[in-house]
Amino acid sequence: MSEPRWILIALLAVLALASARLCWQQWRGPARASGVFATLLLLQAVVTVLLYLTLVPPMQRVAGGQLTVLTGAADQVRWSAAPGETVVALPEATKVADALAAPDLATVLRQHPGATSLRLIGDGLSARDRDVALPRGVRIESPNAPQGWIALQPPAVTAPGAVFTVSARTQGVPSARAELVDPAGVVIDRATPDAEGKVQLSGVARVAGQSVFGLRLLDAEQHVIDTLAVPVDTAAAATPRLLLLAGAPGPEFKYLRRWATDAGLRVQAQANAGGGVSLGDAPIALTAATLAETDVVLLDERSLAGLSAAQRSALQQAIRAGLGVLVRTSGPLSDSARQALRGWGLPVSGNNQAASLTLPADADAALLQARRGPQRPASDTTAYVDEADTASHQAALPVLEQLTLKATDAAALLHDDKGAAVGGYRVLGRGRVALLPITDSYRLVLAGRDDRHAEVWSSVLASVARPLPAADVPRIGTHTPWAGERMALCQLQVTAQVRAPDGALIPLQLDPASGPERCAGYWPNQPGWHQLQQGERRHAFYVFDPASARPLYRQQLRDATAQRLATGAAASSAVVVETPGARWPWLLAFVLAAGLLWWLERRRGVTAG
């Protein structure tokens, strides 16, 4: 039942009680004159009707028309208002003479209910106004597209020492160049955007914690056109556990084991020397319990071919449970090894012919040094060592050898200097199986390029290793939250709260309508790093400042507004609409009638006295 009907029922009930009381007094008490009694009954009915019309005023027909709303960057659009047209400016719009100010679009439409068409001037609607029901006739007049960075994909949470990647897109800057700078302002990578303006740069996360890198856009004359903050959250991860098995000792096994140890991996290495002799660590049985405590098993073609049926079955089950298995080739891949890979779900094609492999060229020497960070203070003797180390890292890359083997329907592990895939892996269940047909990566170390040797194997193992257990981490609705705009946080606990950059704690209220998603709205007022706290757990997220990223913010406004308008409008398109009429005339009549009724009742009491 609607609210006006409930109001009517309540008022009729009150009227019935008041009339019954008046009749009881007329019957039991001193009788009034019949004219006075009838007047009182009539006035009670009139007062009831006037009160109802005050609470629920009659609808009136309002002629429709066009409404012009000024949004952000409206001052960059050439437009003119028609005679008698209503112009309203939202808070983000530049002040215009004769334009009415309004706090939001919902207020504008509520104050002008007859508007059947809407003209937006500027970049479009902010997040505050995009959920408002719009008239059907909505058009937008936008300024020229912003020039600068218009898209950004910040890196995910990164482990210390790992390489992170930043993806971005630029617009309106010919012959542009992109640079990634570290928190100290040192350039660590640079690249040229492609024909679509897309670019990808990389850096190294050095220590755990939150930091802000910078993404600069330069024009053809090397002038900085735009700069974006690139938030990097570096968190310590669990140490990977590596089981390294080889059918025979060799330089590849030796330098691979040395790299894994220096990198801090928990390594268990074994090499078969023949005659039942095993070199390296104590022998480990390939059982389900052992493999469950291992993240990566690294085999060569000999150790793979020598696995028993029970060991192959145990590895296959462990792969389905999340284990990563990588097979490297130091020699020809036998039929037995191919059969084992096929049984695990990684068919291999190609012959065992050797081919040369050239890795992608190094970046600029200065950029490499910037990635490594400042050199430590040292004595003269150590300084000579550092100089020699730096010189060796600038040595030419040797040409490596690979076997012409290809994993069918697999993702690439590496790429050569021409972009061709080298090796491949497939996801099977929760784990991965991979093949890397490089026979002599150790030659990188012998050539003084242990940095590239570490880069190769770090990238390969990162692609294959057991994935981290899925944690109930909070989900943020956008990659680029903005200060002053609402954002959604999901997968929250009841006790969730956010610590702002100034140290203030803001408790979050879960929305019951979000159900199992357990979402809450959050309005950040300050840019910078915010900490979402849930019990003992902390999750950092960065809030961007619209003033320091204008092209990106404007482009997101334009895209979101276009998407909102494409979904259609919800309001009526009638030329004449009905809206509640004015209440004050009915209120005034109610006060006068109620006053007269009170005076008549009061007059009777005075006369009786």
Image (spheres, grey):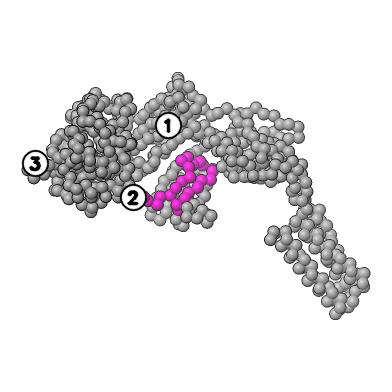
Residue at the spot 14% in from the left edge and 41% down from the top edge: 271
The quadrant of the rendering that contains the C terminus is: bottom right
Above or below: residue 175 compared with residue 415: above
* Disc 2 + disc 3, Cβ < 8 Å: no
Q: CA distance from mark 2 to mark 1?
A: 32 Å
Q: Which residue is mark 3?
A: 274
Q: Which residue is mark 2?
A: 469
Label 1 vs 3, first from the N-terminus: 1
Above or below: residue 388 compared with residue 114: above
Give the magenta-colored segment's residue range.
Answer: 468-492
Q: Residue furthest top?
A: 221
Q: CA distance from mark 2 to mark 3?
A: 39 Å
Amino acid type for the residue under numbered disc 3 = Gly
Magenta span: chief secondary structure: loop
| Residue 41 on image: x %, y % | 86, 68
Above or below: residue 564 compared with residue 46: above
